Amino acid sequence: MIDTRTAPGQGFLSIRGLTKRYASFTAVDNLDLEVPKGELVAFLGPSGCGKTTSLRMIAGLVPVTSGCIVVGGQDLTDVATHRRDMGLVFQSYALFPHMSVAKNVAFGLEMRKVPKDEIAKRVKEAIALVHLTGKEEHRPAQLSGGQQQRVALARALVIRPSILLFDEPLSNLDAKLRDEMRNEIRDIQQRLGITAIFVTHDQSEALTMCDKVVVMNQGRLEQLGTPVDLYERPKTAFVASFVGRTNRLKAVARDGFADFAGQRIVAPAGLSGPVEVMVRPHRVALSPAGGEGVTGTITRAIFAGDILQYDVDAAGQTVSVELATRGGETVLAPGTAVALSWRPQDVFVYGAAA
Amino acid sequence: MSTAIAMPAPVAKPRRNGLALVVALIAPIALVNAFGFLAPVLNLARMSFYEVEPTGTMHEAFSFATWGKVIADTFYAELIVNSIAVSLGITLLTLICSYPITLYLHRSSGIWKTILLVLVISPLLTSAVVRTYGWIAILSEDGLVNNLLASLGLGRLRLMFNETGVIIGLTEILMPYMILALLAGFGRLDPRVEEAASTLGAPPFTIFRRIILPLTLPGIALGCLLCFVLAVSSFITPKLLGGGRVFLLATEIYDQAIVTLNWPLAASLSILVLVIFGAALVLYARALRAVL
């Protein structure tokens, strides 16, 4: 396994023991993270997992309960937001509605007392970078959602922040624009070599855009890794089911093996009793009945063009199977008996959730 | 799948009943305004040209005598200028007192916000007369403030029967209106926008000056218009707290109509008040166009 953890203190952004407690619950619990310079790291998790609170603590918009935030060797934990030199792109864009596009972008530079002619030059560049040349004098309300998000991006980029923070920036855009902006944000981030944090609840955004992904659940870091790590080697049942789709099958473990429908699957040492066996639908192989593996019966068959989806009943549990179509397949009718098999490295066994 | 995707033709909305519906919706308020506002105002305008005897007896006529007096006598010019100046002062003071409260109210949420709103509105449940008497108890020669000052050995202040008293009383009485108007105009103020300014390097006061203030200008304009109009037309509070020594348009109109029985003069001054309101409305419209 590739070690994706950067040693403490080695990251450009270094977060240690970051905790946020409210009266009745802990929003973020002892988060440790090292982000090397120039990397795009996603905070991925369901709503309420603490990802946005973490981002807001990094930006200084939410005071921390304990822990520290260090950027480039400088402890920023108690530094006011306006002195942190970070760019933040909001889900709701948060543009200044009473200012033109150019004024919005210039705002951060004016705060930094940059000379007028340099402001004009840099604003022009930033607006060109996000393909909005010609819209300088428009008010935000006159722009589409995608264009507004580009202005927000330009406004955050133009100050050349030490860290660029994204708070679910694509959630308010329609699917087509989202794909476009996703590529654009990634391009710009790589071209400028900016260190960035990208908060999202959309696992495909996290997987496709980011160098590393932090999966969070209930305020805790579940797993930190590259997209490949998370998908191929999920450490917890939560990560396996949150990142990508997966079958969750009940089984019982004994003596280092989980037993699912007579199939022995290697389980992590020390695990016994009820467990969950997880295997992704497209990693399940289907063969005629009598073949190797678990015997089952097809209960549902769906031809979806690029893939063939089957629901297979095996030992009273439903296993989804997805096969990529290459042309010429026969769609097996419900009721057909089949055998299911998988490679050992594609199966994960976790202790059953209490 | 690429070229010809037939879209269903948009169904034209039936427009036959459109005009009738508009007329039906506007008619009730139009009728009420015609009988309750427009007719009396036209009657006032007509009355301002009547002739009047010192006894108060009016003759239907078309005389410029009253208007001539209003224009020639500097007392009335001073009255108008003073009324406008005092009302503007009250409006400004009301704005300054109400703005921070409204900002806090706008940012609070849930049950706390509801409680605060009820507290803001609750003075309106008491009549202005009662609230003015409350102020008399506080501001009079032997009132709360003066007794406190005297007990501290600081002497007594004249807080009543002068403009100071009128300004203090009216400011408090108009604050609920100002707060509600400001709140209605704070819609564009989004905490995320303030946070965005903060992340871009703006310290708190700069955020106030460059973001909060400009975004709340529509509310400020609305609140000022409302309070100015209410201040110019209020007469109970100036009457009681001014004690007949503060001369404002509204109190003068009351005196002319009820005490002196010079109805044409009261009518002409009322028309002047309407002209002032018209001017305030024009200013408001211009201000709004400038800030939006």
Image (cartoon, rainbow, N blue to C red):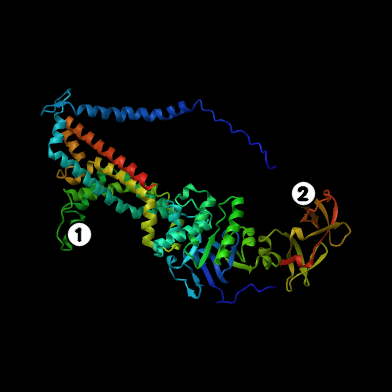
**Is residue B78 among what the camera can see?**
yes
As helix, strand or loop, the secondary structure at mark 2 comes to strand
Where residue A82 appears, as percent x and y from the top left, is 43, 65
For the residue pair B81 and A240, the one nearer the viewer reads as B81
Quarter residue B200 falls in: bottom left
Mark 2 vs mark 1: tell me if same chain.
no
Q: Which residue is mark 2?
A: A302
Where residue A50 appears, as percent x and y from the top left, is 55, 63
The chain under label 1 reads: B
Confirm or deny contact between disc 2 and disc 1 (CB under 8 A).
no
| Type of amino acid under label 2 | Ile
- Tag in front: 2 or 1: 2
Q: Which mark is residue B273?
A: none
Q: Which residue is mark 1?
A: B148
| Type of amino acid under label 1 | Leu
Query: Image point 20% across, 35% down: which residue?
Result: B269
